[in-house]
Amino acid sequence: MNRTAWGYVFVVLAVLSWAGNAIVGRLAPDSGIPPIALNFWRWAVAFVVLAPFAIGSLGAQWRLLFAHWRLVTLFGVAGVAGFNSLLYLALEETTVVQATLISAILPAMVIASARVFLGQPIGARQVAGVLLSFAGVAVIVARGDAAVLLGLVLNRGDLWMLIAVCFWAAQTLLLRFIPKAIDLMAFQVAAIGVGLVVALPFYVGETFGGRPMPVTWTAALMVAYIAVVASAGGYTLWNFGVIRIGPRSAGYFGNLYPVFGALLGIVLLGEPLHGYHLVGGAVVLAGILLATLRKAEA
């Protein structure tokens, strides 16, 4: 496969690796795991996992990385300290259904940002593809029942989720500005380090505010999953994929998140397969294909 084809594979695998993340975030409060602590430790473990792969490049490129410290810092704040902390905060106060629906605006946010900040045109097919894939997400999360959507009531958690999506759109867009001379793995590790430094005061404040991280096997397993699979694996795959296909094209694939979540529930948890899974998944895929297969408007 060529570079672009691999880019699509990478972003799809990244979204697949994240499919269980919202479930972990929703279960964490029931296990006494506070949101900032969960995010801090997932990235601390991911840093330990990824650092050996980047140590050579970090040593060789530290001056280049320091010259672009603003970009590294913004990336660390948006993608490491910001997005998942806000996601876990949101999931303490809202449902996975509402959080997933709000996350489905990511493609629209990315293409709008690409238009404003990168001057990329927005074609009619891209708009139609975004709307179509959003409709597919709505079918899945509402379980084919429009009354579920009509009964949704916005709360503070939904606001946290909206801000979280803004952070992820910013992180996706920032990848476009990484100089080609910088090794991406070294950049990631540097950004994770910065993100941990930024998150540390909030983690300490949460701990001394009466919400310490529990030392249990449940907490360890949750952190291990999201650190190794969702952070080290998914984060790296997403970044390499976005570098290859561009932020706008990658953004469309965010709506595979609920499709993969439903698929994992069926395969791993034995949940029943319903018609709305098939209809919603097909509509999401149709929207992504509509938005990405037209080269003339890419």
Image (cartoon, grey):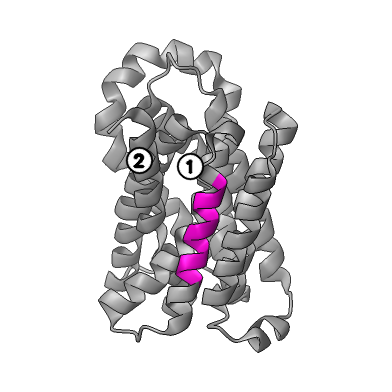
Q: Is residue 199 visible?
A: no
Residue 60: x and y, percent? 33, 12
> Which quarter of the figure is the N terminus placed in?
top left
The answer to whether residue 185 is magenta is no
- The amino acid marked with disc number 2 is Phe
Position of residue 224 relative to residue 76, above or below, is below
Q: Nearer the viewer, residue 205 or 158?
A: 158
Position of residue 18 relative to residue 268, above or below, is above
Disc 2 is placed on an element classified as helix
Residue at x 38% of width, y 37% of height = 7
Q: Main secondary structure of the magenta part?
A: helix
Q: Residues within 10 Å of mark 1 (few under 14, many from 20)?
A: many
Q: Nearer the viewer, residue 56 or 250?
A: 250
Query: Which one is earlier in the sequence, the residue at label 1 or at label 2?
Result: 2
Residue 251: x and y, percent? 55, 46
> Label 2, on which residue?
47
The answer to whether residue 284 is magenta is yes
Q: Is residue 6 left or right of residue 255?
A: left
Q: Is residue 191 visible?
A: yes
> Which quarter of the figure is the C terminus placed in?
top right
Q: Are marks 1 and 2 in contact (CB under 8 Å)?
A: yes
Residue at x 34% of width, y 84% of height = 271
Q: Is residue 123 left or right of residue 53?
A: right
Residue 181 falls in image quadrant: top left
The span picked out in magenta is 280-291
Q: Is residue 280 left or right of residue 216?
A: right
- The amino acid marked with disc number 1 is Leu
Mark 1–mark 2 distance (CA, rounded to whole Å): 9 Å
> Label 1, on which residue?
196
Residue 177 falls in image quadrant: top right
Residue 130: x and y, percent? 62, 54
Disc 1 is placed on an element classified as helix
